[in-house]
């Protein structure tokens, strides 16, 4: 019985990371990229960050979907758009020049509900 309970508890912990091995913290106003990579978590109709600060050049972004709805992450004017089903993740590398780039979930109504932010590249 204890073995079964322990196995169920471990399975539940795996689900918290969205099935990607990436954990997500509470929503913060700003994240500063270190090492050229960042993880952005989506759940319900929110991202876990409002502003991302990064250096010019390549930036690897991983979208982790910890919600129950399909989510995307689009950086305006850049491709590809990241798409992740519930419990899944998607990763892409973007080469960014200095500037300010809005990002949002393009699922109807999500950006309007607040699932958007700004990427500041300096």
Image (tube, rainbow, N blue to C red):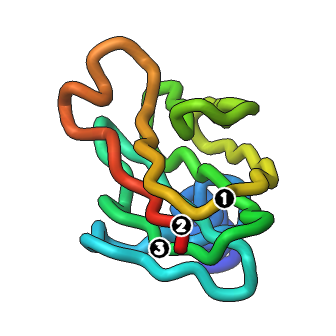
**Residue 9's quadrant in the figure?**
bottom right
- Element type at marker 1? loop
What is the x, y in percent for residue 7? 68, 69
Mark 2 nearby-residue class (10 Å; few <14, some 14–19, many ≥20)? some
- Left or right: residue 3 versus residue 72 is right
Q: Which mark is residue 53?
A: 3
- In depth, the one of 94 and 1 nearer the eye is 94
Closest to the camera, between mark 1 and mark 3, is 1
Q: Residue furthest front?
A: 98
What is the x, y in percent for residue 24? 48, 69
Q: Earlier in the sequence, mark 2 or mark 1?
A: 1
Q: Earlier in the sequence, mark 3 or mark 2?
A: 3
Identity of the residue drawn at 44% across and 67% down: 52
- Left or right: residue 1 versus residue 108 is right
Q: Which residue is mark 1?
A: 97
Q: Which mark is residue 74?
A: none
Q: Earlier in the sequence, mark 1 or mark 3?
A: 3
- Element type at marker 3? strand
């Amino acid at each position: 019985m204890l073995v079964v309970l322990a196995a169920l508890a471990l399975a539940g912990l795996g689900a918290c990371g969205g099935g990607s091995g990436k954990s997500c913290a509470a929503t913060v106003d700003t994240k500063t990229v270190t090492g050229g990579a960042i993880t952005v978590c989506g759940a319900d109709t929110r991202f876990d960050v409002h502003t991302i600060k990064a250096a010019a050049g390549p930036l690897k972004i991983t979208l982790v979907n910890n919600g129950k709805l399909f989510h995307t992450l689009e950086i305006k004017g850049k491709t590809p758009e990241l798409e992740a089903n519930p419990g899944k993740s998607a990763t892409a590398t973007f080469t960014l020049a200095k500037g300010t780039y809005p990002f949002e979930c393009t699922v109807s109504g999500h950006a309007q509900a607040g699932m958007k932010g700004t990427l500041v590249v300096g």
